[in-house]
Amino acid sequence: MNGLRELIKGSVVLPGDPGWDAARRAWHLLVDQQPIAVVEAAGTDDIVATVRYADEHGLAVMAQPTGHGASPAVNGTILLRTGALTEIELDLDAGIVRVGAGVRWRDLNDALTGTGLTSLPGSNGDTTVVGYTLGGGVGWFGRKYGQAAQRVRSVRLVTSDGVIADVNQESAPELFWALRGGGGDFGIVVSMELELMPAMELQGGRMMWPFEQARDVLRAFAEITTYAPDELSLWAWVLHFPDVPFVPDPVRGKSFVAVDGTFLGTPEDADKLLAPLRAIADPVSDQVAPIPLNLVGKIAEEPEDPTPGLLKTVLLSSFDDAAIDTLLAAAAPESPLFVFEVRHLDGAFARPDESLGAAGVIEEPYLLLFGGIVADPALAPVIGGAIEAVQAKMAPWITGRVLPNFSTDEPNTELYPAAVHQRLVAIKQAVDPAGTIRSNHPVS
Ligand SMILES: Cc1cc2nc3c(=O)[nH]c(=O)nc-3n(C[C@H](O)[C@H](O)[C@H](O)COP(=O)(O)OP(=O)(O)OC[C@H]3O[C@@H](n4cnc5c(N)ncnc54)[C@H](O)[C@@H]3O)c2cc1C
């Protein structure tokens, strides 16, 4: 890596340097990342310098602000941290925001709180807006407004030969299409301009019952999703909290069923829609109430610290009574898996729209995520085996497509329909023939 340090205003950490293990670590702790260098960019100039250096030396660069989507594709690359690019430029009159590549959802949600406008955040405040949006983005208000990628107006990026370019529908329509759901393979994004949507009134929170109520709760959830307006998003969970000290006392070692929800509308209308769930006896808690936007990233109570999670996410063709019974048999408290989540999609996710880039329509009405925590490496085969068993049992409802943001080690052919994949490969060939930019899920 001769000469790289001299080019960078931020930091460059190389194998063997003090702090190497911390520098190369991802949020996703099960990926033991082995890059050839880690560059912590101080700003856009450092991104340009890193990409030019890689281009000149026949190397590859991967942007990784947080490592929530880490994969072994990082091995052998220069890992580029973009966390310092935290600018948020709000133009409320125009209804747009420009976010830097290091902005996390919690920062953008904070900035928009009280404005009556929203972007399209996911379950987790710690992921970056840019990383999430490049992969599509299936979040809270998507049933009303679609995937986050659909609301991108323009992308400022550093091309594979180290030039800053503004990519939008007018300047480069093919590349712009690829950047809206095709992932991080086409350049290092410096910032994105996003359209904002109305969110004048917002209800949200978690309702939770003992596991014994799971069948009734999942049936009520499934029933509501057959008529829910697009303003309502519901995600159902079976949660088995391990009996370990870091889990808080009231839930430690116990199993629950929960439904998380957001509603863009009045408390009265939310109450009417949630009435069938509230009719189920003995809730442990019911936190659904008017909330500010900056609490949406906390509804799902996901882990904030780096986590050794082994997860699988699939799409379901339906969530009927037989699917519920099958899932509950697989998700019994003795399962080594900790989490089972069913997200209701449909609405704008399923509607063809000219704003759809490579993310495309999601025809499946439900997403199912399940997995466990590999607290000890010896548990990996146990949890991996349990994941395969759930997949086999739910096979009649699994369609085979995996959304890029939720993919782990699936081949690209499962992430995109064949025509979309071929178009992404052609665009990659055109904009980065040498493979200088590498994403966590390379398109070719
Ligand atoms: C706990 C958890 C909850 C999640 N919830 C949701 C959810 O609700 N909805 C959803 O859709 N997804 C969700 N995801 C998936 C998440 O959106 C993806 O993992 C996403 O890639 C994370 O982006 P990141 O930048 O934070 O992660 P990183 O791992 O840092 O980046 C992931 C990839 O994004 C690309 N990338 C990031 N920044 C740039 C850049 N500046 N230029 C070019 N490429 C870049 C790179 O290819 C990189 O490898 C969740 C993931 C986790 C772990």
Image (tube, rainbow, N blue to C red):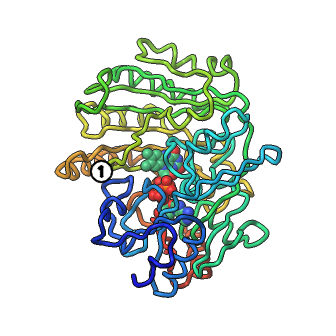
Image location of residue 367, percent across then percent down: 49, 44
Q: Taking 100 as reference, is 282 above or below it?
A: above
Image location of residue 79, percent across then percent down: 43, 68
Q: In this rendering, would 321 be left or right of 111?
A: left
The quadrant holding residue 102 is: bottom right
The residue to which callout 1 is attached is 388
Report if the beta carbon of the residue with label 1 is closer than 8 angstroms to ligand 1. Answer: no
Instruction: Indicate the amino acid at tag 1.
Output: Glu
**SS of the residue under disc 1:** helix
Q: Residue at x 45, y 65 (%)?
A: 440
Image location of residue 439, percent across then percent down: 48, 68
Q: Taking 246 as reference, is 49 above or below it?
A: below
Q: Residue at x 50, y 82 (%)?
A: 53
Label 1 Cα crowd, 10 Å radius (few <14 / some 14-19 / many 20+): few
List the single residue furthest toward the left.
Answer: 378
* Viewer-nearest residue: 400 or 178: 178
